[in-house]
Image (cartoon, rainbow, N blue to C red):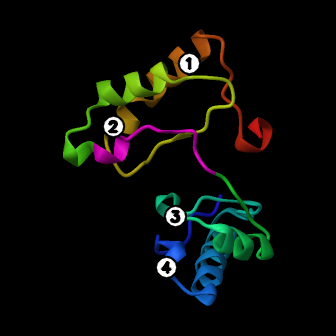
Amino acid sequence: FNHTYSHPYLTEVSDATIRNELSKTETILQKLTGKSTKPYFRPPYGARNAHVLDIAKQEGYRSIFWTLDALDWKESSGQTAAATRERILGNLKPGAIILMHIGDTITGSILDDLFTTITSRGYTIVPLSQGL
């Protein structure tokens, strides 16, 4: 999964910058993991348009978007773990792709419980490649 190198608004940068952002991240993650990020990428901030999607497609990527933003990234603005948990559980449905972040404390504090609760409700958590 490629999310770019420096997290720019892809709709506001040049074609060369879009390509470089994807390529630089691909190279780094390939070296670290031995695996490609292709074919999936998620544009930072969800900022995409037909042109960005076309450039990404030319580079071998398919844009993936979320169906629910957990809002865990709003922790510094008062978002709580409890509110995030309830937002996710209250909006579960088959095929959901939930956007969560690792740069906060909310996700780490609720993830185990979320997985347990989600599976207890009869859902199966699958890799993106299987869910699509």
Image coordinates of residue 52 in percent, x first then y, are: 64, 72
C-alpha span from label 2 to label 3: 24 Å
Residue type pointed to by label 2:
Ile
Identify the residue shown where x is 57% and y is 85%.
17
Identify the residue shown where x is 43% and y is 37%.
70
Residue type pointed to by label 1:
Ile
Asked whether residue 11 is drawn in magenta, I would say no
Residue that numbered label 1 is attached to:
118
Q: Is residue 102 left or right of residue 64?
A: left
- Circle on res. 106: 2
User: Which quadrant holds residue 63?
Assistant: bottom right
SS at badge 4: helix
User: Which quadrant holds residue 23?
Assistant: bottom right
Residue type pointed to by label 4:
Glu
SS at badge 1: helix
C-alpha span from label 4 to label 1: 38 Å
Marks 4, 1: nearer the viewer = 4
Label located before the other in sequence (2 or 4):
4
User: In which quadrant is the N terminus drawn?
Assistant: bottom right
The answer to whether the residues at label 3 and label 4 have Cβ atoms under 8 Å apart is yes
Q: Check disc 2: other Cα within 10 Å, few if <14, some if 14-19, many if 20+.
A: many
**Is residue 31 something one can see in this rendering?**
no
Identify the residue shown where x is 57% and y is 39%.
67
Q: Check disc 1: other Cα within 10 Å, few if <14, some if 14-19, many if 20+.
A: some
SS at badge 3: loop
